[in-house]
Image (spheres, grey):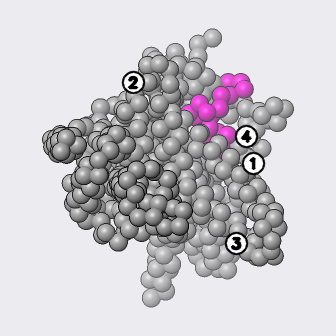
Amino acid sequence: MREYIDFYEEGIVSSLIKFDNVSFSYGKNSVLQDIDLSVEKGEFLAVLGYNGSGKSTMAKLINGILVPSSGKVYVDGMDTSDEKNLSEIRKKAGMVFQNPDNQIVATIVEEDVAFAPENLGLDPKEIRTRVDDAIKAVGLEKHIKDAPHKLSGGQKQRVAIAGVLAMRPMCIILDEPTAMLDPKGRSLVMNVINRLNRENGITVVLITHFMEEAVLADRIIVLANGKIAMEGTPRTIFSEKDKVTSLGLEVPPVTELAIKLSENGIKVSKDIIRPEELIEAITALKEDIH
Amino acid sequence: MRDITLGQYINGDSPIHRLDPRVRLILTLVYIIILFSFKSILQMILALVFILIAYAIVKIPLKMLLKSLKPIIPIVLFTSILNMFFISGDVVFSFWKISVTKQGLYYAALMSLRVICLLAGSSLLTYTSTPIELTGALESLFKPLTKLGFPVNDLAMMMTIALRFIPTLLEETDKIMAAQKSRGANLDTGKLFERIKALTPILIPLFVSAFRRADELALAMECRCYNGGEGRTRLNELRLKRSDLKATLVFCLFCVLLVLAGKI
């Protein structure tokens, strides 16, 4: 039987990340079952699901920290279960974790960002360019010489993102990067993630439990009981409020509001997912009245 | 968040601060060896003058140096007195059964000067170098040992991580202490033994969290392509500059001066 990898090499398929009938279990505990998923180059994918639905496991499967119990995961055509591919895969798919404190290695911001390129054995000049570019991309130029413990949570998380960017990855996987941040830090980090995707064309896989963040994605998958329970654009997902709620999640606050408004006879669409859309809808209503 | 400075590094931009940390480290070591190999008081005075000039260049106030000398005053006094009373030679004056000799006074002065220079010299190193600079210097100096299978890079990485996590863990200790106090733990009063016992509910969560952090950090490091020290390069590679050469030359001149002083 011809496998995905053959088609990839022949250019028939080109997904950056491909889950091919992947299952994963810790001992007897099955975490993921028969996952089929492909993420295209430049895509922004959000992964939602209640705690313990297998979100983090999925992230760890992408860059070979975990290897599927059955099935295959491919990154840019490389099989993650092959040891030889690991360093190349990790260079292509960078990973950012929840707690910024536990992923910063060095005592100075620029040296931490330099950690990955140093591991790759690059020339000091090349490292310098990459470090400067990465720090600029996350907007921390002013803090280049600071000690990480003096930065705020949001700044630390941006250092962590810069540390991954310095590998010049094709894809960044973020495992609940904003869970420990205050609202301001969260919005700054989300701005950076969004910009990296839209302007630099970096593929983003964002694991989150904030619906407002998932709305920014091109596509959402919802995990439940180790399976993909829903898949679609943010609008199609959140228009099915009952199903989303039954999977242990909520729709974004603005969608909730739009639904309540329309139930109370105000004619706004129920599939509004962004605040701007609701404003527009209400302004349009106001003009109708006049 | 508290502002922790490790060691006693004083931020500055003096010529000595700008020296390659390896040069600073080696010159300090040589200075200490010199202190113990020269035996005339004139040489010790020269050594003291030399280190004071260095302090003037770094612009560290003399007060600070005196403060760091404070803890060793008892040692200096103790050795001086011993030397004064127990070295036999030409008696200068005697009191009751004790007599003070010329040689005794000489050695007392020599020893005191030596200890003062020793402390001033090593403090100058820690005043002008961050712990991370010293780690880098040691890593680079011990690099040849890698060939013998000694894990120099790994040790340096461990040092760096330890330094990186000291503030984080201190902060965590604060939080745990506050949490335990708010639940009625009594940490500040009681007998010594009771107070040590009261530390258990702080140390256990601290250890657990340190292990959890270590686990996550290892994962994050692996994700950033770390697989041991081999083949790593550095962003800021230590490179000897002209100023390092100049400083070494000045130091050599000082050594020559000392040797000459010994001949007088």
The CA span between labels 2 and 1 is: 49 Å
Element marked by disc 4: strand
The Cα atoms of the two marked residues, 4 and 1, are separated by 12 Å
Q: Which residue is mark 3?
A: B178
Say what amino acid the circle numbered 4 marks: Lys
Q: Looking at the picture, which amino acid does disc 1 mark?
A: Gly
Residue A172's tag is none
Q: Residue at x 66, y 50 (%)?
A: B210
Q: CA distance from mark 2 to mark 3?
A: 47 Å
* Residue at the disc numbered 1: A52
**Relative depth, front residue between A160 and B16:** B16
Res B124 → quadrant = bottom left
Check disc 2 and report the residue beneath it. Answer: B144
Mark 2 or mark 3: which comes first in sequence? 2
Nearer to the camera, A3 or B87 = B87
Of badges 1 and 3, nearer the viewer stands 3
x and y, in percent, of residue B223 in the image: 53, 37
Q: Quadrant of the C terminus of chain B?
A: top left
Magenta residues? A56-71
- Give the mark nearer the N terminus: 4 vs 1: 1
Mark pair 3, 4: CA separation: 42 Å
Report whether B33 appears left or right of A92. Answer: left
Q: Chain of mark 3?
A: B
Callout 1: residue from which chain? A
Label 4, on which residue? A227
Q: Is residue B122 magenta?
A: no
Rate crowding at label 1 as few (under 14), some (14 to 19) or many (20 or more) other CA atoms within 10 Å: few
